[in-house]
Image: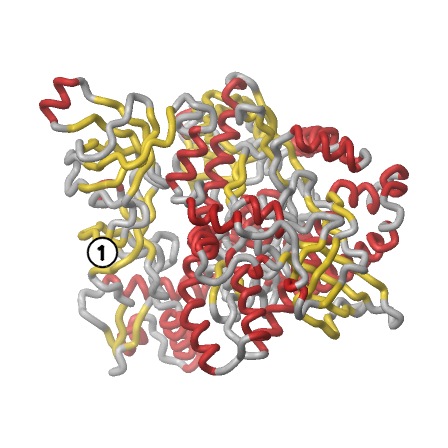
Amino acid sequence: MSKDFERFKQAIIDYIEQDNRESIEVNDVTNKFNNHDSAQFKRQVKALATLEREEKIEMLGDGRLRLKRLPDSIVGTFSGTDRGFGFVMVEDEGIDDIFVPAKATKLAFDGDTVEVEITEAPDPSGKRSAEGKITRIIERKTEQVIGEFIPYTDDEIADYNLYGYVKAKLKKGPEHIIQIEMNGLNPTRGEIVSVDITHYPAYKGEDMRGVVTETIGHKDEPGIEILSIVHKHNIRSKFPDEVLAEAEQVPDQISAADLKGRRDLRGQQIITIDGADAKDLDDAVTVERLDNGHFQLGVHIADVSHYVREDSALDKEAFERGTSSYLTDRVIPMLPQRLSNGICSLHPKVDRLTLSCEMEINQQGNVVAYDIFPSVIRSVERMTYEAVNHILEEKHPQTRKQYQSLVPMLEEMAELHHILEQKRRHRGAIDFDSDEAKIIVDKDGKAIDIELRERRVGERLIESFMLAANETVSEHYSKADLPILYRVHEQPDESKMKRFLEFITTFGLTVQASKDSITPKDLQGVMDRIKDEPYEAVISMLLLRSMQQARYDVDPIGHYGLGADYYSHFTSPIRRYPDLILHRLIHYYDEVGRSQQDKKRWASRLSDMAKHSSEAERRAIDAERETDELKKTEFMADKVGQEFMGTIISITGFGMFIQLPNTVEGLVHVSMMDDDYYKFNEDHLVMIGERTGKVFRIGQPIKVKLMRADVEEVQIDFSIVEDFAKGDKPTDKHHKKIHRQKQHHKSKSSQSKHHQNKPASKQHKKSKKKKKKSQKNRRHDFKIVQKDK
């Protein structure tokens, strides 16, 4: 719409605001703006209709109108910040997040259900959200905290009737002091403990109280920081005795009885392709060219549901965990290792039970026929991504000779992958293609390096095959009208997408679509245009932040990021509970029944499973991100005073966040920008010097000095050495310098993986020496799409 029309709409809003009456007549607007001729009146009608659709005004039905009112008090969820202020998120459509200043939070914690009173209405232009104050805390969601115990002296214990206090940092928000009552454990100084809160403060200055229920370890023990994160996010790290006992009863080998009703695929050329350090091999693949020119793709997934029976101790524990958590120096598995690394893992040269999805795919990437069935396989080879990349990309003679019997099939796999990838791109699936940061730790878990690892053809072809299987299985059961869990991803938030579309215009990028009708294909077009540009990573990150979070649901509402109408998680039952449930349902519908009673039984349970699984995934992602931030800070701790090239990735009123080529992020606080007085322009997301006119923009290269890397606070601070902020655009040489540093981190990664080209026996010996985790689905900054493959 034209700027004149937008100004006219705003003038109407201003007029209504300035009028003291409860409501005004439409004729008042007509008279005010002299809209008496036909063309002007049509313009007025259009403006009022637009304002009503945008929920800026409401028509009262008697020829009168008024500004859209928010209710006097609203119930929502409080989202806190380290700086004390926060936001109340409301589920009702049409109400944006409500800003709550630090002085008005009523000491609410992150996640609390609160009642908030609106104290300042949102700006009609949408530039400023509503402001409010919390009037009541309806439900506390933080019942347990983790922190360091500080004991009182004997005299203080006698006076206060308290053991001491704990300094605790919640997921979001400032540090808290919890006074420790004497009806729980009595830990020693410096121990990291778990505290159940017994009393919350009602006013500033009142004590928060609690009892110690568990000691986790001493603050100086190696790895204690990660254990603290695990406990803070309520991730179960120890298996109960009954779960371990049940796991011990699972056989090490399959029996003749296990083969009943299964299709025997042990004669096929089936392989696994995973990271060199992966232990839980839950997917295997095979590809064959058919006489009609089509491809036969077989995706064979470990049949975990055969061993983890409904309502067993193993099943209940897997449900509670929801997912495996991949932290920097450890894996917290969903299932005991006897299953995840043993009978369920598709090791080579041994028989394994699987659920298979065989698909016939034509040259356009369409699945023209498929079959889903229980099977038994015997993988012929345990391939690594690196070996496949050497065969397909680098044509490495030694590696091709080592796997010469598999090379023809691998080349057909690559061809099929490119067909499937092109089909996804054509329909608009968004590819957030960025390098993964791998934090290398020593034997004590201390971060000693950060390597960048790119997704190459080996990783990408497995992604393509898993996506194809997930979509095929999902669509099959949806069209059969049988209840299952879906992996859904909704359309982006309109306000966030509007902000993103406005921001990219500063890079000369436009999208010919409105914020409420933009398609994944439109956004993939943006990604295509910025490919290999210096600002590619920044725009990709900002687009990702504009997206909704993927989640589980019982309704097939589609997956926006993948451009898929039907999508479910089928391919990773060793480490994701929704996949395990889907396998269980496949067996149930084929072996037990599909009656209305059967459908009703599962439909009533799946809704809770979807909600719980989404929450468990969120906990794991938060713990993984927090662990990475901790280890990156630890890696930088001995580099204070050193200078680095970086990129501005975010600008706020209190400073600029800088990302280094190795993905480490830190803050240049506005107080460190002492060559001028800088003001934050929220509309354009820039920082402008009042005297010099110097402009700092997102995506701009910058040279910084590391001033602080505080591991305890997980805080990295930079100061500016050279800013390149005078011109409209930075010079290419600065972008090239950042690119060279990224390539340096990648080359270190390639060198460290060179041993993987050696014969399998030597490779196995070397991989045992390093405690690395699987690369599978570890990309914290790209969870929306990458977690869904």
Q: Name the spot of residue 558 as percent of width and height, x first.
A: 55, 68
Q: Nearer the viewer, residue 186 or 242?
A: 242
| The C terminus: image quadrant | bottom right
631 lies left or right of 71: right
Q: In the displayed image of the protein, which residue is found farthest to the left?
A: 159
306 lies left or right of 255: left
Q: In the displayed image of the protein, which residue is found farthest to the front?
A: 256
Q: Name the spot of residue 449 as percent of width and height, x first.
A: 60, 26
Q: Residue at x 54, y 69 (%)?
A: 585
Q: Amino acid at mark 1?
A: Glu
Q: Residue at x 79, y 70 (%)?
A: 362
Residue 131 makes an appearance in the image: yes
Q: Nearer the viewer, residue 19 or 671?
A: 671
Q: Residue at x 54, y 32 (%)?
A: 664
Q: Nearer the viewer, residue 432 or 219?
A: 219
Q: Quadrant of residue 643?
A: top right
- At mark 1, the secondary structure is strand
Question: Which residue position is annotated with label 1?
Answer: 115
Q: Name the spot of residue 201 as percent of width and height, x first.
A: 17, 40
Reply above or below: 154 against 375. Answer: above
